Amino acid sequence: ACGEDSGGDGNGGGGDGYVIGFSQVGAESAWRTANSKSVQDAAAADDRITELKFDDGQQDQEKQIAAVRSFINQAVDAIVIAPVVETGWTDVLTEASDAGIPVVLADRGVEAADEDLYVTRLGSDFEAEGRSAGEWAATTFATTPDFKILELTGTTGSAPANDRKAGFFAVLDEKGVAYTLVDSQTGNFTAEEGKATMETFITTHGLDGIQLLYAHNDEMGLGAIQAIEESGKAPGTDIQIIIVDGSKAGFQAGVDGKVNYIVECNPAFGEQLMDVVVDVIEGGSPEKFTPVEEGVFGPDQFEAELPNRQF
Ligand code: GZL
């Protein structure tokens, strides 16, 4: 943080800056790394923030819960959590509430039952992202009766995996589209696991007659592309691919004709998050959910957009 170090007495207020504890999901993707950088840079540049205590949860909820308990013991002014999965947070969120420490969710959400245990969530509308993907699929395969789909889902039990799936199939069902979901397994939002799951799909089903792969993030889509090419098929042609995030590597794959549609998910909300957290510490009561701005990109936009990608 700028200015003299007030020693992070953890009680904030007055001339001292605030001390924030941030429990981050992990470092599983380019999106996540960009998100961590955005939050850390924003905190460091913000005179109102004395210290951001950052914990990398390594995609492990128990590690995240331990970090939150540590933040409570250090009497931070606010706790920010990007919850790896939606359930299992009630106890630790109750402990934070009992300690009088407000909790703000960043990125992912928690189950509705715990809605009263955090002040607000700043992040993406994952269902809307899924709906955007579904709209494109419904249009693209409108003349392919009973088109076949493979789905690489994100981390099991995570809000983006649950909601990107829900939004996608809600649109297909609302439009009365005839489709077959041939298989749907998790790739845990990583390239390695996405590739391994795609290899299993190929071994089990083959790719002939399968029109679409819906991958819940870029890394799993890029891993799947490797598996598809190693099987002798052309990603983007023999099987069309939707990815979600919009990383440089994802857009490059689009420029290379290996990805057909990109739904953006915006990690760069660090400054907005600092404003929300300071507002909450100072007694503000923001809306329960503040969506971050993000768009969608088809093949004719990949080339022009690639230079703009930040992660
Ligand atoms: C979405 C975020 C997801 C990204 C993945 O906001 O939680 O987690 O889509 C990341 O890349 O792993």
Image: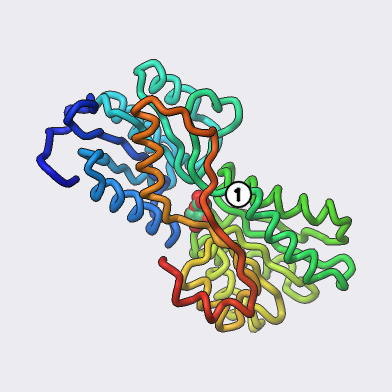
Residue 167 vertical position relative to residue 67 in the rendered view, above or below? below
In the figure, is residue 148 to the left or right of 194?
right
Q: Residue at x 76, y 53 (%)?
A: 169
> Residue 251 at x, y = what percent?
52, 74
What is the quadrant of the C terminus in the image?
Answer: bottom left
Q: Nearer the viewer, residue 207 or 259?
A: 259
Q: Residue at x 17, y 32 (%)?
A: 8
Residue 285 vertical position relative to residue 256 in the rendered view, above or below? above
> Residue 63 at x, y = what percent?
37, 38
> Residue 19 at x, y = what percent?
25, 34
In the figure, is residue 28 to the left or right of 223?
left
Q: Badge 1: how crowded within 10 Å, few (<14), some, or many (20+)?
A: many
Q: Residue at x 61, y 69 (%)?
A: 297
What is the quadrant of the N terminus in the image?
Answer: top left
Q: Is mark 1 within 8 Å of ligand 1?
A: yes
**On the image, numbered disc 1 is attached to which residue?**
126
Quadrant assignment, res 196 = bottom right
Quadrant assignment, res 132 = bottom right
Residue 287 vertical position relative to residue 176 in the rendered view, above or below? above
In the figure, is residue 217 to the left or right of 41?
right
Q: Residue at x 34, y 46 (%)?
A: 56
> Residue 22 at x, y = what percent?
34, 39
The amino acid type, in three-letter code, at marker 1 is: Phe
In the figure, is residue 113 to the left or right of 105?
right
Q: Nearer the viewer, residue 209 or 139?
A: 139
